[in-house]
Image (spheres, coloured by chain):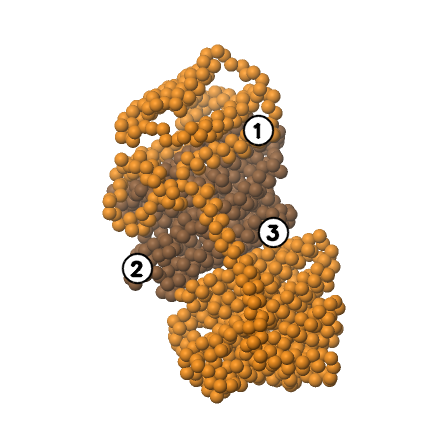
Amino acid sequence: MFVAVLAGFAAALIVPWLHGRVGDRSGWLVALVPLGLTIYLGTQLNGIANGETVGATSEWVPSLGVDLAFHLDGLSLLFALIITSIGTLVIIYGGGYLKGDPLLGRFYAYILIFMGAMLGVVLANNLITLFVFWELTSISSYLLIGFKHDKADSRQSALQALLVTGSGGLALLGGLVLLGHVAGTNTISALAAQGNLIRDDGLYGAILILVLLGAFTKSAQFPFHFWLPGAMAAPTPVSAYLHSATMVKAGIYLLARLQPVLGGTDAWQIALTGVGAATMTMGAFIAWRQTDLKRILAYSTVSALGMLVLLLGMGTEYAVKAAITLLLAHSLYKGALFLVAGSLDHETGTRDVALMGGLWRKMPWTGTAALVVAASMAGIVPLFGFISKEVFYKAAYDAPDAAAVLTGLVVFSSVLLVAAAGLVSLKPFLGTTGRTPQSPHEAPLSMTLGPLLLAGLSVGFGIVPGPVTDYVVKGATQAALNDTSAKVELVLWPGINTVLLLSFLTIIAGLGVYAGRKPLQRRVGWLDAGERIGPARAYRALLDGMLWLADRQTRILQNGYLRVYLITIVTVTTGLVGYTLLAQTDLDGALRSPDVRVYELLIAGVILAATLAVTQAQSRLAAVAALGTVGYGIALLYILFGAPDLAMTQFAIETLTVLLFVLVIYRLPRFGRISSPVVRVRDATIAISAGAMMTLLVLIVTADPARTGLTSYFAENSVTEAKGRNIVNVILVDFRALDTLGEIVVLAVAAAGVYSLLKLRPDREIRNRVSAPRSTVEMNAVSEDRIEDHITELTP
Amino acid sequence: MSIFLLLPVLVPFLTAVVTMLFWHERLIQRRVNVVGGIAFFVAALGLLALVWRDGIQATQIGNWPAPFGITLVADLFSAIMVVMAGLMGLVVAVYSLGSIDERREAFGYYPLLHTLLMGVSGAFLTGDMFNLYVWFEVMLIASFVLMALGGQRDQLEGALKYVTINLLSSALFLTSVGILYSVTGTLNMADLAHQISSGAVDSGLATVLAMMFLVAFGIKAGLFPLFFWLPASYHTPPIAITALFSGLLTKVGVYALVRVFTLIFVQDVDYTHTLLMVIAGLTMVTGVLGAVAQTEVRRLLSFHIISQIGYLLMGLGLFTELALTGVIVFMVHVIIAKSALFLVSGIVRQVAGSYDLKQLGGLYRTNAGLAALFFLPALALAGLPPFSGFWAKLTLVRAGLETEEYAIVAVSLVVSVLTLFSMTKIWAEAFWKDRPGQDEAFQPLLSPQRIALLGPVIVLAALTVILGLGAEPLIDLGTEAAAQLLNPSEYIQAVLGDVA
């Protein structure tokens, strides 16, 4: 089973190379991978139908409870078969559709990665492993939707799909982690047994919401459905595969899989039926009013996905059976219709149905397939779509709650979908010849094979529903219900009853809508106003809002002014430390009058006065001199506290600094006051607060005598062990020699750095100048002038 | 005394000295640079292996017993960080061969590079608060000169902001060390931990000091709202330097935060670590929004550094074994992924002539390999499975959910969507869209340069995949390291012997 899941990924690594070697017909060769997998899965049918399951587990990241665990039961098998079989057809089709595209090799690779990921999702038996593959489908979908990467529209749609499903995916991650936490296991097959425990847990609500967000975004439920029509920017085989047959059903799979774990509660039922019904109705209502083939199909897919969620929400045995049946029928007919749409686009050069007509004569194979699968979509006897609609209607009719409302909505949607089915089959293929940009021919075998095979299956499953029921639908239904005793039967002709009558009426009404679509469309045209304030708008607004916020906050925060940065940092320090100081320490000690002598106070006074003088100085020289006084004052304090060597150093440094300043002063621009009084008051407040905070801290700390454990050790061992009489020297060169080494390195680097910075000057026209943006502004143009000033100050 | 503790400091030191001795011999410097890079990496691996096998290692410099002399000490966390420094050192040393211009090489680029590595290594290994300050200074001066080397206008502007704000941090750090010393009478970290945990220091006062260290290290780490120096300067030097800085400098700040807030300041976790979590959230959000607003690749990536620092801090704030495991896994992941992205963008610049998304385009069609080299680490950075970032994120998310800190988990998840968004921005602009208005062909990479540039990037990109597909060993290692962090007694014992 590992081989089955990993085959797609492995093959993806070599197909671009293979394609390069084989050329145009490579699609047939690449399709052998999914075909092989289909055959492998086919061999499992019998065993699974008899209630067996196949599993394989290997440790992956055991410390996080993540195993590479796979589990094949009826539900997984149904999905896996859809994935691999339609995958086979899509790859063959893609080879024809994208013939000659230089990136066809990458197309195969992405499709195979996607297929592998999708198989991983439906086979995974570990919550986190499932999520890993789930996200991989989003990534490969991103690459596939953006396949026509030079079109801005494709890029945007790819991003939109990624963001919507990606956000949902992260909600899902939260939900799955919580689920695993509550259940005490990540193994999916073990969760059902914990169902009651999970549903009674306080976190159930959160888990449900998060998981549903994941499933609804992926399966394009209202109000997240809008990415799906957008994703039609993808090449059509991609739409057929990802956005109709498989990926959008990942959410359905997840709901079906977790139904025994999370289902059966009121919340589950209300959320799923509500959202499902809304999605179904809305999708159908939009679908029949489109003229773009792919958009018709996209919205009808949205509608179908809504139906599936609705059915899973009802949760009765019959409804789950109906969901499985509908899912299978939908994959067959909708996948085929997308492929047909692709062929039409490919051959006629347009996707606008209004321009098409009478194509059946030119494209008989494609046309035949299209008419058959559209009939299945419309639910016409004897196709599989008819059976699925029958069970669907009956499920709605027998719904435990609000049966009348649901049945009404279901019938209403189905009527409109019949009209949509007419639009994609009757309109292009029958009637008078249209005016298409290219004159059409029948599509090549690679592109007719898929639709024809799928049409054949729609017919076959419809006329002889027995085998597919016993081997596929039954197992899947039982697995979704977690009940191997559930009875599952499907028959083509259940006899005359209310449901059949409804079905009949649906088709008549649907054809009526199709025939009278033009006046009807005009009649409801005003509803389009609703779309303008719809979720797609909300998405756009959210994105724009986020971009606006990002821009704004960055301009405010990273504004380019060094002084603002410093002000912020000092304020934060003062606030954080000051608050903690006031809130958490005992201030009594600090406020005790400290034991100071008069001359200490005197020196402190001098330092303070000199500091004040710096801020008030009228010339740079005066300011430097005053700074020097501050330094000398501090050196005096060192002397008073018994550190004459330190004081000597300080004197030397202060003197040198002042001298250096004096030397460079004449190269600096004229001294002037550029700050306003308000700014100065603000700065003074900040400075004084910071100083006050520091003073208070130091007072508190010095209220207790300092601990000097090290000093006595140094004093005792300086001579005896380190053979030196000057303790300070011994500390520097022996006790803490490593510090000194570090400081020497600092000095050496500083010296070398000064040398390099002085010597290595940019030539006026140096080469790498090309790279550097001319502007030196950090964020915005506003600060440019100031910064230029700054720079001129630096490099005269 | 273990030589393995000294080698990660000594090797880059000697490399710096030797390259400096050959100041005028550019070619010799280049060779010594690579040999030194390899030796450093090997020494770091040796240290990690030793600590993994024998537990926490400590050595007293000059044989002065702790807490009187200076102690070098390596627990698993330190050793992992040293290995990451070794990896980054080697990768950047090689990449520099193909990307640093001759003039910079002639003016001490290689000595500075290895001096920086020495400082980083020292900071990871020291067990002494003041000595940590010294290593910070070594890093600061080396990084400042590296940043300004070349003397271009924007470089000088960036470097000026960089050095000013970082000096403020140094001053605060030094003050804090001084006050801490006067309160405890020691500079040895293990001894500090011992004293504060045994109640020798008033708990409230310890918390005040914790705040000071938080700001001092927070500036270095690039936390909100102290990160200004980073976006102001990281886009100005050559990309190899930016990549190195992004891999190591802020991470040293985070390392220091993790060290003091697991070893020393754990007296009032409710107050300090809750605060850390709030800052973490704000850092993530402001960082990623900053990134979203950029259209220049280096600036965009620079803002991302900040955002990712938020994740690291989140794990520290949660303060459980799983969360600290997450910190370590995330650290390893983000160092690799982020440097890979910077280095790839350097190649993009080499090939397409710009860092500006508005001028880039068309690389997807012609340069598939380069596109893949960007795409993989970009996904990893956004935390998508199955790449390295996913496991890091998963660990943190799980740790957050298990401790019922739902708000920070929600923030971290939203931020990862925005991260993905900004990564797709680069992808769509530089790779997918057509190149605007330029018909000139892309610059092909020539052979020797090709290896020097692509080799490191391939290694890093491959690591994001390997650490994703085979995450268990790293998580295992992280779990062990986190256990050591949460149980400081082993550390204290290794440094001080039996104290209690």
Q: Which chain is brown?
A: B
Numbered tag placed on residue B443 in the rendering:
2
Q: Is residue A333 above or below residue A275?
A: below
Q: Is residue A217 left or right of residue A796?
A: right
Tell me if I can see residue B184 in this picture: yes
Quick one: SS at disc 2?
loop
Q: Chain of mark 3?
A: B
User: In which image quadrant can residue B264 be found?
Assistant: top right
Label 3 belongs to which residue?
B398
Quick one: SS at disc 3?
helix
Which of marks 2 and 3 precedes in the sequence? 3
- Near mark 2 (Cα within 10 A), the count class, few <14, some 14-19 or many ≥20, is few
Q: CA distance from mark 2 to mark 1?
A: 60 Å
Numbered tag placed on residue B254 in the rendering:
none
**Which residue is nearer to you in this view: B25 or A141?**
A141
Label 1 belongs to which residue?
A581
Q: Which amino acid is tagged 1? A: Leu
Residue mark closest to the camera, 2 vs 1:
1
Q: CA distance from mark 3 to mark 2?
A: 46 Å
Q: Chain A appears in which tint?
A: orange
Residue occupying the point 42% across, 28% down: A677
Q: Is residue B154 above or below residue A639?
A: below
x then y, percent, for residue B190 = 54, 34
Residue mark closest to the camera, 3 vs 2:
2
